[in-house]
Image (cartoon, grey):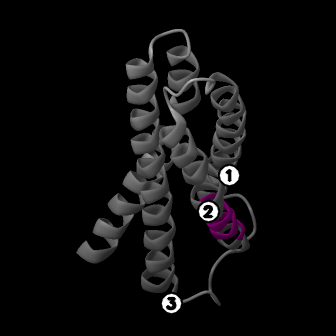
Amino acid sequence: MIGSLVLGVLHIAGAALWFGGVLSIAPIVRRSLGFGRDVQRSAATLAYRFGWFSGVGTLLSCASGVALIFSHYGGFKGLPPRFHIALTLSILALLNAFLLLIPTLSRLKAHAGEEGARTKTEDAVKRLSLATAFSHLFWFISLILMFARSWPS
């Protein structure tokens, strides 16, 4: 019983990090463009950390969700279809975080404050906005699926 409670808390905490970690990445980087190199470097470093928080939150949410599946439902066989869809979306969000979001943030951090980096930064902000939109879309649909009790189990 306590194990399920701890897993549930970890699952919700991971989902909060997943959602909140990327919430302000693109605006932070975009707003730093009007300032000096040190501000741009600081913004890129901050955005990189937020991206990692989001990636770790996505991983924590996915892993604790799988643990809850085995502890509560006894495996995938007894799992309602909505949880299969939500797990698939969280895996897609995990891929989005570690294949699109974090590599873009790494490149942004490496080039922040350089001469002529404004174009690279503007392109990175567009990719970050796309990665953030995917992350929030996957999170929101997963949230709806977690609480949609009226669907067939």
Q: Who comes first in sequence, dot 3 or dot 2?
A: 3
Q: Label 3 vs label 2: CA separation?
A: 20 Å
Q: Residue 138 carries which label?
A: 1
Q: Toward which corner of the image does residue 84 lie, by quadrant?
A: bottom right
For the question of whether residue 45 can be seen, the reply is yes
Residue 93 is inside the magenta segment? yes
Q: Label 3 vs label 1: CA separation?
A: 25 Å
Neighbourhood count class around disc 2 (C-alpha, 10 Å): few under 14, some 14–19, many 20 upward: many
Residue 133: image x %, image y %? 69, 39
Name which residue type carries label 2.
Ser
**What main secondary structure does the magenta stretch of the protein show?**
helix
Q: Which mark is residue 102?
A: none
Name which residue type carries label 3.
Gly
Q: Which quadrant: the N terminus?
A: bottom left
Cβ atoms under marks 1 and 2 closer than 8 Å? yes
Of helix, strand and loop, which one carries label 3?
loop
Residue 7: image x %, image y %? 35, 69
Q: Which contiguous range is marked in magenta?
A: 85-94
Seen in the image, is 141 located left or right of residue 23? right
Name which residue type carries label 1.
Phe
Q: Which of 45 and 59 is in front in this view?
A: 45
Q: Which mark is residue 74?
A: 3
Q: In this view, does 17 lie above or below 108?
A: below
Cβ atoms under marks 3 and 1 closer than 8 Å? no
Q: Which of 95 and 4 is in front in this view?
A: 95
The residue under label 2 is: 90
